């Protein structure tokens, strides 16, 4: 299968006295593939996607989109890209149809082809019945769907989706995930950035895990989870007395990693069924109160904890 994106040692350093925002990242995306960049806020995902979109100039490395270098042949490279930014890029006092017509004209569409394409996109994003209502009357999730529609008008070969479900309700999130899968089923490649483990697991053929500006792991879900073997993830919600508990639990037999974030402690353990009693005894012995316990089978949370020593939510 041909490659639509080729990234080699891509880097971005904004100021000499700060670490690089992106540090030597390399990956490729095949035509028709959903490839996710997964990592916490500040990992370098948005900077990476901004460089690939030609919005930020790289400090080093190269990126090819559809075989065209984004630095030396940006116009040709951008013809293959549809961009869905984190921020809503719509005019609130215009309707969805008017916004889509505006962006379609920016892509060089006009006349009947533009009208037909706007109608097609409105149907695809499920907003035909609200097409002539002003954007300012839309919910956050509906605005996100129009934002996605604007990136589809010129029928790009690959869609860049940067954290498209942040700050929206569960129903709208579900609609966007289903839309992404439907677009992919039609043959569109997608570069999807997220800090939600569940989204990357559901959508992606392959996943790149980022932290601190670096790509620390890359592969299919099965390939990544094999990195931690049969280890389970245990997530403890602590009501009070959390100080020092992660360090204590890290010393227990069978506990590989322990990380704290606010009122949560995330553990990577060899066998949750076997080790859970000792974990509970150790926590209660400190006087802390456990509000809830969640046990997960090997997943990307476990991989991230294994690789970095901290929870993905950090």
Image (cartoon, helix red, strand yellow):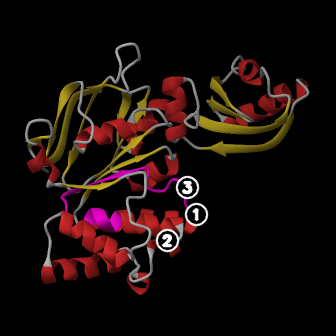
Q: In what element is the residue under mark 1?
A: loop
Camera-nearest residue between 290 and 169: 169
Q: Residue furthest front?
A: 93
Q: Quadrant of residue 311?
A: top right
Check disc 1: other Cα within 10 Å, few if <14, some if 14-19, many if 20+: few
Q: Quadrant of residue 70?
A: top left
Q: Residue furthest bottom?
A: 129
The residue wearing badge 2 is: 136
Query: As displayed, is residue 123 above or below residue 51?
Result: below
The residue wearing badge 3 is: 167
Q: In what element is the residue under mark 3?
A: loop
The residue wearing badge 1 is: 169
Residue 101 pos. (x, y %): 26, 74
Q: Residue at x 73, y 23 (%)?
A: 249
Horizontal arrangement in the rendering, residue 48 relative to residue 166 (left or right): left
Is tag 2's residue or tag 1's residue first in the polypeptide sequence? 2
In the rendered structure, which segment of residues is drawn in magenta?
148-168
Horizontal arrangement in the rendering, residue 268 relative to residue 155 (left or right): right
């Amino acid at each position: 299968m041909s490659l639509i994106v080729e990234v080699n040692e891509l880097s971005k350093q904004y100021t000499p006295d700060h670490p690089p925002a992106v540090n030597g990242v390399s990956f490729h995306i095949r035509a028709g593939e959903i490839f996710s960049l997964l990592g916490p806020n500040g990992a370098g995902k948005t900077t990476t996607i901004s460089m690939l979109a030609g919005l930020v100039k790289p400090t080093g490395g190269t990126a090819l989109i559809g075989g065209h270098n984004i630095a030396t042949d940006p116009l040709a490279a951008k013809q293959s890209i549809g961009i869905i930014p984190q921020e809503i890029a719509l005019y609130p006092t215009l309707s969805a149809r008017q916004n889509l017509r505006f962006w379609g004209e920016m892509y060089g569409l006009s006349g009947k082809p533009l009208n037909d394409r706007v109608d097609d996109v409105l149907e695809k994003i499920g907003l035909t019945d609200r097409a002539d209502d002003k954007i300012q009357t839309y919910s956050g999730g509906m605005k996100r769907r129009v934002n996605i529609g604007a990136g589809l008008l010129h029928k790009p070969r690959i869609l860049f989706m940067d954290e498209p479900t942040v700050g929206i309700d569960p129903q709208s999130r579900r609609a966007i995930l289903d839309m992404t899968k439907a677009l992919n089923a039609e043959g569109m490649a997608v570069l999807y950035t997220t800090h939600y483990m569940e989204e990357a697991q559901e959508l992606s053929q392959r996943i790149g895990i980022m932290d601190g500006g670096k790509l620390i792991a890359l592969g299919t879900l099965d390939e990544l989870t094999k990195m931690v073997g049969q280890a389970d993830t245990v997530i403890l919600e602590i009501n009070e007395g959390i100080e020092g508990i992660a360090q204590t639990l890290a010393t227990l037999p069978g506990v590989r990693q322990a990380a704290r974030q606010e009122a949560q402690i995330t553990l990577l353990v060899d066998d949750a069924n076997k080790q859970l009693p000792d974990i509970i005894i150790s926590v209660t012995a400190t006087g802390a109160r456990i509000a809830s316990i969640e046990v997960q089978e090997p997943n990307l949370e476990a991989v991230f904890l294994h690789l970095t020593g901290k929870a993905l939510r950090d």
